[in-house]
Amino acid sequence: MEDVLVSYIKSKISITDEELKVILSYFKPVKLKKNELLVTNVHSPKKTFFVVKGCLRIFYINKEGQDSTRYFAFENQFATALHTFITSEPSDELLQAVEDSEVYYITHQDFYHLLDIIPQWEKFYRIYIEIACIANTKRLMSFMVQDALEKYKQLLEENPIIVRRLSNKMVASYLNISQETLSRLKSKL
């Protein structure tokens, strides 16, 4: 399991074996059951999670009780309630295991400690933030300028794993459309 995390880190930054050993000492493995909540409105631990196996999702629930998914993290991806992780302020974001999952987590305190003691970790963090910023910008743009069909086509092109592995309910939540609309879109393609 650790090999996946090692490969990911090494694909982003150049570090010595000793530095890697220190970094890994701060990551803790955990197995999650399907539908298990990791971050809730009530209790928001300041952690970031690296998915080795499975899928995590970050989502909101509106006043009517409907959820809207902001992000899915599959294998070799990080997931966190980024606003809470950075600022320590409460957030309405929830983080949930969508499938039985194996993840590593690191606390905010440990993550930031690594920034102080391993210079290359700054580069890792910059890359991490850039990836999150790009993903969030693309999502925001899709909501502002694309209709449902365009969003679905883009999803099929850029991230088909979401459609292949997740339920129509989850896909619709991610696209911010109804399940009925999603079914109509699928029948058109």
Image: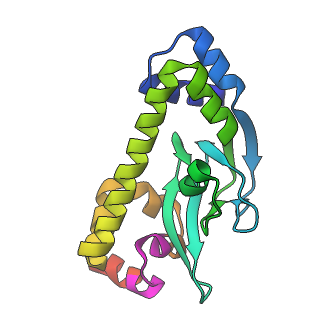
Query: Is residue 81 found inside the magenta-colored segment of the image?
Result: no
Q: Quadrant of residue 40?
A: bottom right
Q: Is residue 155 left or right of residue 80?
A: left
**Magenta residues?**
171-181
**Residue displayed at 32% across by 59% down:** 138
Question: Between 24 and 116, which is closer to the camera in this rendering?
Answer: 116
Say how many tags the image has: 0
Q: Position of residue 86 (x, y in %)?
A: 57, 48
Question: Between 13 and 171, which is closer to the camera in this rendering?
Answer: 13
Is residue 97 among the parts visible in the rendering? no
Q: Position of residue 51 (x, y in %)?
A: 59, 43
Q: Is residue 187 above or below residue 9?
A: below
Q: Is residue 71 above or below residue 189?
A: above
**Residue displayed at 62% across by 85% down:** 65
Q: Is residue 63 above or below residue 143?
A: below
Most frequent secondary structure within the magenta stretch: helix
**Residue displayed at 57% across by 82% down:** 62
Q: Quadrant of the C terminus?
A: bottom left
Q: Quadrant of residue 13?
A: top left
Q: Quadrant of residue 98?
A: bottom right
Question: Between 54 and 113, which is closer to the camera in this rendering?
Answer: 113
Q: Position of residue 84 (x, y in %)?
A: 61, 56
Q: Position of residue 57 (x, y in %)?
A: 57, 60
